[in-house]
Amino acid sequence: MSLKPTSLLMFTAHLAFYSAVGVAVVAAQPPDRTGTGRVLFDFDNADTSEKWRIVNDDVMGGRSSSKLTISEDGIAKFFGELSLENNGGFASIRSRPTKLDLKLDQKIALRVRGDGRRYNFNLYVPRRQTAFSYQAEFETSQGEWIQIDLPLSEFVATSFGRRVEGDTLDPSQVEAIGVLLSDKLAGRFELLIDWVRIDNAE
């Protein structure tokens, strides 16, 4: 079946937008176990959830809530409700510390299906500074599986969501990763994650 000219134009524009921001568009479909790169995390086993922990704004008096569950077909679901009450406004998941062996000429690749909201991908290093991480933002597309590519060279140092000037990432120090929602939009959210990989940056 051929697309009408108007539909074809809209599809082309949609595809061009995601290509411009480094996102590969993939039609909604079951888990995809193909691809290149080294797997950092997948969710084929239910006990994989023990390698992750929830960190929400309740640690500072906020009222956001979130959960992480793993389906029988190996998909992680990070979901909950973001609240801006009591000066809150963030919900996150974070892997437990382990050696990840990252290098600056690599990129983080993750396959997700989101809700159209903007999330942050976080890299954590052993540092005493409060709420410190290296971050890169990524957009999701409502109900659509997409691959996100985040070069390690583009992550920026942050503390409490604010950029820390004069600090650059040393990938060899990264011991944990995470996903954070802090887009200042109260309400429910849901992000499905198929896998997280490390690959050579193009």
Image (cartoon, helix red, strand yellow):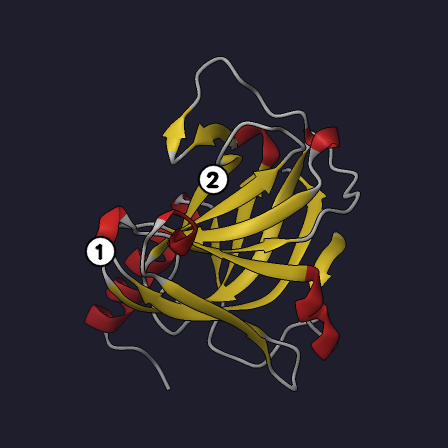
Q: Position of residue 165 (x, y in %)?
A: 44, 16
The residue labelled by disc 1 is: 85
Proximity of marks 1 and 2: CB atoms separated by less than 8 Å: no
Q: Is residue 49 above or below residue 30?
A: above
Q: Secondary structure at mark 2?
A: strand
- Quarter of the image containing the N terminus? bottom left
* Residue under the image location 39 percent in, 70 percent down: 80
Determine if residue 190 is in view: no
Whole-Å distance between the Cαs marked 1 and 2?
25 Å
Q: Mark 1 vs mark 2: which is more N-terminal?
A: 1
Q: Please state if 27 lies on the left or on the right of 32 as rendered.
A: left
* Residue under the image location 66 percent in, 45 percent down: 176
Q: Position of residue 195 (x, y in %)?
A: 64, 63
Q: Residue furthest top?
A: 166
Of 181 and 132, which appears nearest the observer?
132
Which amino acid type corresponds to the residue marked 1 in the rendered image? Answer: Glu
The residue labelled by disc 2 is: 136
Q: Residues within 10 Å of mark 1 (few under 14, many from 20)?
A: few
Determine if residue 28 is in view: yes
* Residue under the image location 32 percent in, 59 percent down: 117
Which amino acid type corresponds to the residue marked 2 in the rendered image? Answer: Ala
Of 77 and 106, which appears nearest the observer?
77
Q: Position of residue 74 (x, y in %)?
A: 66, 78
Q: Position of residue 32 (x, y in %)?
A: 64, 73
Q: Please state if 92 lies on the left or on the right of 174 as rendered.
A: left
Q: Quadrant of residue 30?
A: bottom right
